[in-house]
Image: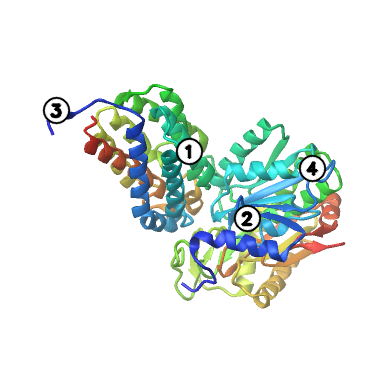
């Protein structure tokens, strides 16, 4: 195992201490695992709270700040945070205008946030929830837990965060978050497995010359294994999977996301192919974001997320944001 | 051990010792649970349960609860507060609901424990929306509770059998469900850890002459 860590047990706490030192604009409670924007609670404004397992950085702590999340709760690596963290976060950021929990569709996240919402409401905090389930690699059926929440989370947090920053009421912020989720779809590809600190070896065995199609963000294998493809072929496959499911009528925002170990040189090259496929499919691209945003430790690979936008969603996307990982317009 | 040494009721101490045994077993088996979880999940099950049951042992040692029901309720609350993931709320709910069902009685019987854990299992099923056959912890828990109506050993055997029976199943709940057919051929880590709970219960009962 080659990892820049001390011991697996302190990985999350160590990272939070370092994050606190790098970002004085955040309040980081290392002990209780809550990251809060320093000026919270912001009077009269709805607060977005998200969280999930660690190992997806910059998601979610890197998205805390004006225009996006009011607070984030990092769990253990790939493990949902516990309800105590979410309740503490909600209490720290609620100004009386209410709190929106942004929850990725994984059983653990859903259950813990559900328990937290009940506890927070007992404390007199008005809570709404939005479930992100954008991953088209997972076929939906009555018998499954539904689709995973992956790259679409960034769109939900940014756009609903901007609506909250404008002072829109909880009901409205929640409706916008749902609209963003309904219009977002993702597909991910792994060129390597990842190594969790607790396990110390790759989570699955991927031989040289093969890749996994339809992966999530937890180092689990995908839906299908194939012989290695070129960037061009991967873009064709991934974008087609997204477009066929989303069937966009209007412009989209495209997120070309790295899983953690794929350099920008490759991601930009992949983005060129993504833009080509979208042009061939006559899907206009309003904005594009390329980088490592929703990662899976040291996994090599990428995902494509498209969000079909109307004028309002695009305006909210362009609105100022000031967080460690996403920053523009101010 | 003669039949005169066998008792059919137990108090809070028995359940505290059971949960301490679970903590030891989970600690010993953590790597195996994580290995099973890395095949079809996200390789954290062992580490998470180890952290949770260690916290349970600590909290029960610090403030020994007065009744069997209170032991289970406190343990469940502690699991929810420390484990995270899906196993925190699910195991936490199992024990909390069982504890609430037992109430405040100072002594209970195996039959009452089976009934209480049955209520806990029903709550787990409702919370996770899963049934037997979905390749989850319920595949071990449901037969184990049924077995517990007869004996501790029957519960242990049924749980182990239920866990093994998850191997050929396709997962329909939880993270493994995202793999579709690729989940077939792997033993479910949640059912495996559930079997550990009942193995520890049978060991504790055997060691203490509780029937």
Q: Label 4: state its secondary structure.
A: loop
On the image, the x and y values in percent for residue B6 come to: 19, 28
Which quadrant is the N terminus of chain B positioned in?
A: top left
Asked where in the image residue A271 lies, by quadrant, the reply is: bottom right
Q: Vertically, is A86 above or below B93?
A: below
Which residue is located at x 42 percent, y 53 percent?
A: B46
Which quadrant is the C terminus of chain B positioned in?
A: top left
Asked where in the image residue B148 lies, by quadrant, the reply is: top left
Q: Which residue is mark 1?
A: B92
Whether pointer 3 and pointer 4 mark residues with C-beta atoms closer than 8 Å, the reply is no
Mark carried by residue B3? 3
Q: Which residue is mark 4?
A: A46
Specify whether B130 is left or right of A251: left
Q: Vertically, is B162 above or below A191?
A: above
* Relative depth, front residue between A107 and A26: A26
Which residue is located at x 40 percent, y 38 percent?
A: B138
First in residue order: circle 1 vs circle 3? 3
Residue situated furthest bottom in the rendering: A265
Specify whether B192 is left or right of A48: left
* Relative depth, front residue between A19 and B119: A19
Whether pointer 3 and pointer 2 mark residues with C-beta atoms closer than 8 Å, the reply is no
Whether pointer 2 and pointer 1 mark residues with C-beta atoms closer than 8 Å, the reply is no
Whether pointer 1 and pointer 3 mark residues with C-beta atoms closer than 8 Å, the reply is no
Q: Label 3: state its secondary structure.
A: helix
On the image, the x and y values in percent for residue A292 come to: 66, 67
Q: Label 2: state its secondary structure.
A: loop
Q: Nearer the viewer, mark 4 or mark 2?
A: 2
Mark carried by residue A30? 2
The residues tagged by marks 1 and 3 sit, at their Cα atoms, a distance apart of 35 Å
Which residue is located at x 32 percent, y 39 percent?
A: B198
On the image, the x and y values in percent for residue A215 come to: 55, 60
């Amino acid at each position: 195992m080659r990892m820049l860590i001390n011991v697996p047990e302190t990985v999350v706490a160590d990272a939070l201490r370092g994050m606190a030192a790098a970002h004085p604009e955040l309040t980081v409670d290392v002990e209780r695992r809550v990251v809060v924007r320093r000026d919270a609670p912001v009077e009269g404004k709805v607060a977005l709270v998200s969280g999930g397992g660690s190992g997806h950085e910059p998601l979610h702590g890197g998205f805390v700040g004006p225009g996006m999340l009011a607070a984030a709760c990092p769990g253990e690596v790939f493990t949902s945070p516990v309800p105590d963290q979410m309740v503490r976060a909600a209490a720290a950021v609620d100004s009386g205008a209410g709190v929106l929990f942004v929850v990725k569709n994984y059983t653990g996240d859903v259950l813990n946030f559900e328990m937290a919402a009940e506890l927070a409401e007992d404390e007199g905090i008005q809570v709404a929830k939005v479930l992100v389930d954008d991953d088209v690699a997972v076929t939906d059926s009555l018998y499954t837990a539904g689709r995973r929440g992956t790259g679409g989370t960034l769109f939900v947090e940014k756009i609903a965060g901007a609506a909250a920053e404008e002072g829109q009421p909880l009901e409205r912020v929640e409706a916008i978050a749902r609209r963003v989720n309904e219009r977002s779809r993702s597909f991910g590809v792994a060129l390597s497995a990842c190594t969790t600190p607790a396990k110390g070896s790759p989570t699955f065995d991927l031989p040289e010359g093969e890749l996994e199609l339809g992966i999530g963000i937890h180092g689990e294998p995908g839906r299908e294994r194939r012989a290695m493809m070129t960037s061009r072929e991967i873009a064709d496959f991934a974008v087609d999977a997204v477009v066929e499911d989303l069937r966009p009528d209007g412009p989209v925002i495209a997120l070309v996301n790295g899983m953690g170990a794929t350099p920008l040189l490759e991601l930009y090259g992949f983005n060129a192919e993504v833009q080509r496929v979208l042009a061939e499919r006559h899907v206009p691209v309003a904005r594009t974001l390329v980088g490592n945003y929703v990662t899976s430790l040291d996994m090599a690979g990428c995902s494509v997320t498209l969000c079909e936008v109307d004028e309002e969603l695009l305006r909210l996307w362009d609105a100022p944001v000031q967080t460690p990982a996403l920053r523009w317009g101010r | 051990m003669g039949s005169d040494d066998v008792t059919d009721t137990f108090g809070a101490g028995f359940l505290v010792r059971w949960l301490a045994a679970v903590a030891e077993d989970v600690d010993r088996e953590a790597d195996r649970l994580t290995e099973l979880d890395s095949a079809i999940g996200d390789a954290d099950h062992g580490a998470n349960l180890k952290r949770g049951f260690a916290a349970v042992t600590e909290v029960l040692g610090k403030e020994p609860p007065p009744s069997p029901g209170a032991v289970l309720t406190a343990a469940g609350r502690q699991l929810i507060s420390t484990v995270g993931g899906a196993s925190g709320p699910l195991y936490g709910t199992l024990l909390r609901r069982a504890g609430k069902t037992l109430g405040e009685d100072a002594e209970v019987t195996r039959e009452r424990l089976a009934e209480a854990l049955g209520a806990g299992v029903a709550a787990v099923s409702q919370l996770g929306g899963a049934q037997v056959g979905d390749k989850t912890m319920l595949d071990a828990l449901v037969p184990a509770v049924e077995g517990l109506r007869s004996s501790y050993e029957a519960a242990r055997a049924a749980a182990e059998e239920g866990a093994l029976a998850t191997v050929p199943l396709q997962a329909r709940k939880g993270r493994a469900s995202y793999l579709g057919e690729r989940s077939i051929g792997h033993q479910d880590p949640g059912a495996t850890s559930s079997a550990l709970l009942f193995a520890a219960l049978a060991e504790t009962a055997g060691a203490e002459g509780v029937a």
